[in-house]
Image: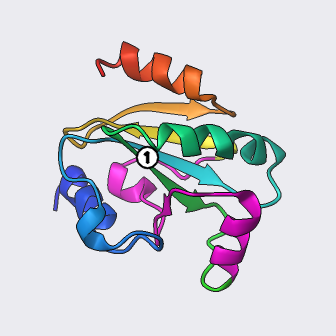
Amino acid sequence: MTRILALVFLLATGCDSRPTQSLPAEGQWRLVNYWALWCTPCREEIPELNLVDKAPDITVFGVNYDDQKEPMLSQQRSEMGILFANLPQDPASALGVPRPSVLPTTLIVSPEGNLVATLKGPQTAQSLKRVLFELGR
């Protein structure tokens, strides 16, 4: 299975807050954000990601850096105010990249399924929109 197909499969098979039918098909920009409860910059970034996730052509997915499972994952997502879906497993290997060593880290996946950018450190809605514009959105 190619990396792109592996990611599409991963994104379509088990986010914890949305039914599979509502996950984005091809044609969506996907932001994969690594977060942790103990990460202060992550806490500051979450409201910005919630805003970006409302765009019709962008979907944000979270990855809990500490690999929390239910029910702790839902509790931490609630405490952080995360409104976007969380991936059930780390997609780094499917994308052919190492697991991030800096939090927060946001991976940008193009509508074609290609990893096109890795952003380290906290982002704002404005900085993400600027990067996406530069990438051709």
User: How far across and how far down the image is residue 29, in percent?
Assistant: 32, 38
Asked which secondary structure carries label 1, the reply is: loop
Does 29 appear above or below 40? Answer: above
User: How far across and how far down the image is residue 42, in percent?
Assistant: 73, 46
| Magenta-tinted stretch | 72-100
Is residue 90 highlighted in magenta? yes
Look at 63% across and 28% down and name the residue there. 124
Which quadrant, please, contains the C terminus? top left
Is residue 77 highlighted in magenta? yes
Look at 55% across and 53% down and name the residue there. 99
Q: Amino acid at mark 1?
A: Val
Left or right of 113, for residue 89: right
Look at 40% across and 57% down and name the residue there. 93
Which quadrant, please, contains the N terminus? bottom left
Look at 29% across and 18% down and name the residue there. 136
Residue marked by disc 1 = 97
Q: Foreground residue, 10 or 14?
A: 14
